[in-house]
Amino acid sequence: MGLFGRKKKKKEDSNSEWTSFEFVQHLIKHPDTSDDTFVMMYENLLGEDNLEKDMNDYWKHRVTESFISQEENKKIKKAYDQRFKKIRKLAQAKIETDDIVKWAVTNTDDDRTTNEQSSKENKF
């Protein structure tokens, strides 16, 4: 509940801006969210990428409250670290693909023809 008994608005839009802490909380509450959605969320990450730190802080807290064991914590940490790596790789691949598309759009056939003609002229 938020201030004055109103329900807090739940952040569901992957296009909105997310802090590292909010990203981790969403991942914990909705682990079945698609990688594509997490990539969009990651692209809108505000501030520094502290995903592992925020995740570790959350699970350490759970261990101290005796909700999970140390052994379970290690397994969970490993699984989430792998998920973070995958999300980062997908986000990087998307950026590289977008860069290639931008390059292809800006370098039209007319530009290539002009460049080829000027290089032929320079040879003579």
Image: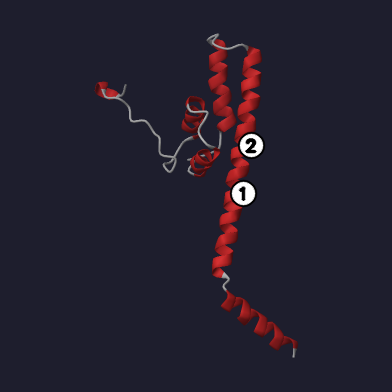
Say what amino acid the circle numbered 1 marks.
Ala
Q: Residue at point 57% right, 52% down?
A: 95
Q: Quadrant of residue 49?
A: top right
What's the distance in space between the residues labelled 2 and 1, CA to CA? 12 Å
Image location (x, y in percent) of residue 108: 57, 73
Q: Earlier in the sequence, mark 2 or mark 1?
A: 2
Residue at the limit of the structure toward the right, as seen here? 123
Residue count near mark 2 (Cα–Cα under 10 Å), binned few <14, some 14–19, many ≥20:
few
From the viewer's side, name the closer residue of 3 and 79.
79
The N terminus is located in which quarter? top left
Quadrant where the C terminus sits is bottom right
Q: Is residue 92 above or below residue 34?
A: below
The spot of residue 22 in percent (x, y) is: 46, 31
For residue 20, above or below residue 60: below
Q: Residue type at mark 2?
A: Lys
Give percent across and percent down for residue 6. 26, 24
* Left or right of 39, for residue 112: right
Q: Residue at x 55, y 62 (%)?
A: 102
According to the image, label 1 marks what residue?
93
Q: Which mark is residue 85?
A: 2
Residue 110 falls in which quadrant of the image? bottom right
Q: Residues within 10 Å of mark 1 (few under 14, many from 20)?
A: few
- Which residue is depicted at the point 53% across and 41% down? 36
Residue that lies at the very extreme toward the bottom in this rendered image: 124
Q: How many marks?
A: 2
